[in-house]
Image (tube, rainbow, N blue to C red):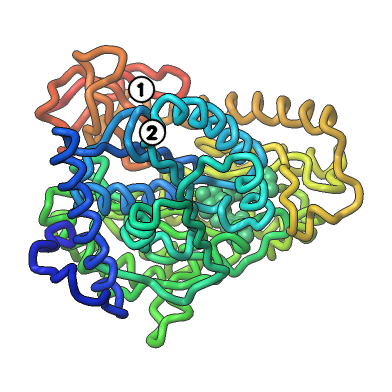
Amino acid sequence: MDNEIDLGQIDINSEPPIEEPARQYYFMAKCREWVREFERKNGRRPCFFTQTFGCQMNAKDSEKLAGILEAVGFLEADGEDADFVLYNTCTVRENANQRVYGRLGQLGVLKKKRPWMLIALCGCMMQEKEVIKKLKASYPFVDLIFGTHNIFQLAELLFRCLDQQKPVVEVWEETDKIVEKLPAQRKYSFKSGVNIMFGCNNFCSYCIVPYVRGRERSRSPQEIIREIKALAADGVVEVMLLGQNVNSYGKTLDKPVSFARLLEEVEQVEGIKRIRFMTSHPKDLSDELIEVMSRSVKVCPHLHLPLQSGSSRILKQMNRKYTKEQYLALAEKIKEAVPGISLTTDIIVGFPGETEEDFLETLDVVEKVSFDSAFTFIYSKRTGTPAAAMADQVPYDVVKERFDRLLKRVQEISAKALSRHLHTVQEVLAEEVNTHDGRLITGRLGNNTLVHFPGGPKLIGSVVSVSLDEFKGFYYMGNLKE
Ligand code: SAH
Ligand code: SF4
Ligand code: F3S
C-alpha cells in the first residue's frame, strides 16, 4: 500500500514539488541518495532508533516516522547506539518532560563518543516555546527539532539537516492540513492503530493537549476506510481507531459523519474481526453509538470513558461539561445496553481546590461504576492552562495520600470486576509469545483483559477459544478449547 512508493521514479535533480505528499516523496528520494552514499563510504546502512514517550497517538506517529526512515533505507536499531536517534516526546504531565531531559543528558554523553550521530526531537513537548529555549541553551547537540503539525515533513527536514550540516528547528504553531498517503511502519502484523482525527477542541482546564496538538480535524471516512481495507488485506484483524475525543468525530467535515456511522462502515470491512477506539469523552457519547455497540459483533465490548473527577464542582472547574450524576447515568445506560462491557477510566487526583469531600465523591463513583481498570494520575500543573493559574493548588503530601488511597481501592475493585469471566470460554486474540515463559501465548479478550495459555507462535494473529481457568489479580491463565 502506501509503503510501496517507487522512489526510483522521482527526478531528484528537478525542483521540489510544492504539493504534498509529492514533496515528501521527493525528499525521501533525496534522503535515499544520502543513505546510499553512507553505505558506499561505511560498508553498512545507517540505522535509526525511535522512542515514544506519550499516548497511542504519539506511538502511531512514531510508526509513521519509522515508516519514512525505512522507506529511505535506514535499518532499525534497538537502542541509542544508532546513527539517527529520534525522541517523540509528550508533555501531558511534568514527569513526561523530565524523562525526556534525563534521556537527552545521556544521549549528549553518547554523542561525544559517536560525533557523527544525529539527534532529533519531535512531538508534543516541541510545541512549547519554553522547551525550545531550554533545548537551545542547554542541549546544543540536538540536530533536528520539529513539532506535531509538521511531523509529515521528516524527510524534508532530515535532508535539510544533512545538506546544511547545521541544526534545523522547525515548529509550526498550527495547521489545518492532513497529509495522507505517507508510509508507516507496523509494529504488529495483526493489529494496528488508525488515526481518525487529530487535535482537540475541548480545553479541559488542566490539559495542555489542545495547545500542542491544535484544533480538531477529522480524516475523511473514505481515507480511513481505504487505510483499513489495505491493513485488512495485509493481515490485520484488529484496528484501534484513535482520536482525543472520538465521539466528536466528523463534526467538522464538509459532509459531517457521526462516529457511530463510521464504526458501521469499518464493520463492513472484510477481514477485520475486532474494532476498538480511544478515547471517548462522556459529554459527546451518543445514544446512536451505544446502539451500534450493542448490536455490533466486531466492536469490542470495552469503553474507555475518562471520569477525571467524581465531584460535580471540580468537574465544572475542569470544564468537562458533565456532572457526577450524568456520568453515573451514562455508565448505567451503557452497562444495560452492552451486558458484560468493560468500562475503564482516567482519574486526576489533586486538581486545584479539590477538598476531601470532592475526593470522596470520586471514590464514590469508582465504587458505583466498578471499573475494570483506572489510570490514576496526580494533577500536574501545565504552564499556560487555566488550571495552572487557579488558587488553592493542593499540597503534594495531601494529594499523595489521596492518590494512594484511590489506587488501593481501584486495584481491589478492578481485581473483583475482572474476575467475572472466570470459568467461562471466551474468544481471545493471540498476540505474542509470553515474555517470561516461551511455552505460553499471551492474548486479549474483547474487553481487553490479558490471558496466558499454552500454545505455539503459529497462533499469533488468530482469534481462538480459550477457557479461563484461573484468575490472577488482573489476568487469566487459560487453555485452548476446540
Ligand atoms: N483526550 C483524552 C485524554 C488525553 S490525556 C480524554 O479527554 O479523555 C490522558 C489523560 O491524562 C487524561 O484523561 C487525564 O486523566 C490525564 N491528564 C491530562 N492532563 C493532566 C494533568 N495536567 N495532570 C494530570 N493528569 C492529566
Ligand atoms: Fe485534554 Fe480534555 Fe482534550 Fe482530553 S478532551 S485531550 S483531557 S482537553
Ligand atoms: Fe502526550 Fe501529546 Fe499524547 S502530550 S498524551 S503525546 S497527545
Image quadrant of residue 118? top left
Does ligand 1 reach within 8 Å of label 1's beta carbon? no
Which residue is under mark 1? 476
- Viewer-side residue, 305 vs 27: 27
Q: Amino acid at mark 2?
A: Thr
Which residue is under mark 2? 449
Secondary element type, mark 1: strand
Specify which label sits upstream in the sequence, 1 or 2. 2
Q: x, y (%) of residue 417?
A: 50, 31
- Rendered residue at 28%/52% (across/down): 239
Left or right position of 70 against 333:
left
Q: x, y (%) of residue 200?
A: 55, 65
- Rendered residue at 52%/35% (across/down): 373
Q: x, y (%) of residue 238?
A: 25, 48
- Rendered residue at 18%/68% (across/down): 12
Q: x, y (%) of residue 425?
A: 25, 30
**Residue 341, placed above or below residue 259:** above
Left or right position of 474 against 266:
right
Left or right position of 276 against 458:
right
Q: CA distance from mark 1 to mark 2?
A: 8 Å
Secondary element type, mark 2: loop
Q: Is residue 330 visible?
A: no
- Viewer-side residue, 21 vs 184: 21
Q: Amino acid at mark 1?
A: Tyr
Q: Quadrant of the N terminus?
A: bottom left
- Rendered residue at 34%/49% (across/down): 300
Outermost bottom residue: 254
- Viewer-side residue, 239 vs 298: 239
10 Å crowding of disc 2: few (<14), some (14-19), many (20+): some
Image quadrant of residue 94? top right
Whether label 1 touches label 2, CB < 8 Å: yes
Left or right position of 76 against 51:
left
